[in-house]
Image (spheres, grey):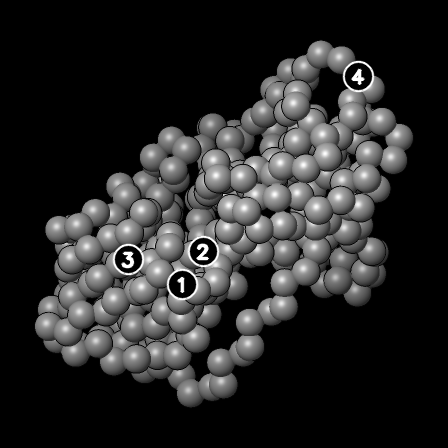
Amino acid sequence: MSLHVVEVGPLVTVQDRGRRGHAHLGVPRAGALDTRAADLANRVVGNDPDAAVLEVLMGGLVLRSDVGRWVAVTGASGPGRAAWLAAGAELRVEPPATGLRSYVAVAGGIAVPPVLGSRSTDTLSWVGPPRVEAGARLPVGRPLREPPAFDVPRPPAPGPLRIVPGPRDDWFAPGALDRLCAAAYVVTADSDRIGLRLDGPPLERVRPGELASEGMVLGAVQVPPDGRPVVFLADHPPTGGYPVIGVVDEDDLWQCAQVRPGERVRFTRRQPDPARAAARR
């Protein structure tokens, strides 16, 4: 089976849970930015969690199937319920009224060849499958099971991005992390899968010069010389030379996938949670 791509919007890529374990080779992790939405899309059509889906920026995607299959659209554009796409029928992902990225799952998963153990497209170095263009044919795997019957959970409520101090918070003026949490920052138009770029009160440095390149992690809040923070997302480079003032909790990064340019985000210090820490050991 294959899906025929009739139309695309600004950007459509294939994503799964990412290309982990290759940062020492200079390969970013990639993967779906809104992991909650991607996991839900796979779950409602009966896929395993690591099946590949389509990540759709601002809608505009039209697909045609050559056989009947269960599909689901989640994230910005869809409620996350399974729907039957008949042979020859078209699935349209309209531009969302709110949010930014939608996720399309099809029973069996998008079965493009994996690269370094993942089917994710990395937009920093373009490792993995190419961006999805009109006229492409996307192979689809064999379904594993029928869609399960369950109530679709309500989307989580957005809120401030919880943050913990980073490894270079001593490069900033005393209280800089508190000032970051006290202000509202505006998402700029040059934000992408690499980083959420923010405009707002600059963070003052007390140490001049720059770092030698060092390893970066998902959610790192790096501060370039202009003092305005950047939240590193799934396609971030493995290393960087600007100081990291803090790291955003991974459970809040889905919000960075859905916030639009011109919208505001806020930060808050993450409070210790012993039960959560024990569960992740």
Q: Which label's residue is closer to the chain start, 1 or 4? A: 1
Which residue occupies the extreme right position in the image? 174
Looking at the picture, does residue 277 appear above or below residue 82?
above
> Of the residues shown, which amino acid type is indicated by label 2?
Leu
Q: Are marks 2 and 1 in contact (CB under 8 Å)?
A: yes
For the residue pair 77 and 71, the one nearer the viewer reads as 77
Structural crowding at the residue carrying mark 4, measured as other residues with C-alpha within 10 Å and reported as few (<14), some (14–19) or many (≥20): few
Callout 4: helix, strand or loop? loop
Q: Which label's residue is closer to the chain start, 2 or 3? A: 3
**Point 53% across, 31% down: residue:** 238
Report x, y in % for residue 83. Answer: 30, 80
Residue underneath mark 3:
60
> Of the residues shown, which amino acid type is indicated by label 3?
Gly
Mark 4 to mark 2: distance in Å? 37 Å
Report x, y in % for residue 270. Answer: 78, 53
Mark 1 to mark 3: distance in Å? 9 Å
Q: Which label's residue is closer to the chain start, 4 or 3? A: 3
Question: What is the quadrant of the C terminus in the image?
Answer: bottom right
Report x, y in % for residue 73. Answer: 36, 69
**Point 43% across, 56% down: residue:** 101
Residue underneath mark 2:
100
Q: Which label's residue is closer to the chain start, 1 or 3? A: 3
Structural crowding at the residue carrying mark 1, measured as other residues with C-alpha within 10 Å and reported as few (<14), some (14–19) or many (≥20): some
Can you see residue 80? Answer: yes
**Point 66% across, 31% down: residue:** 228
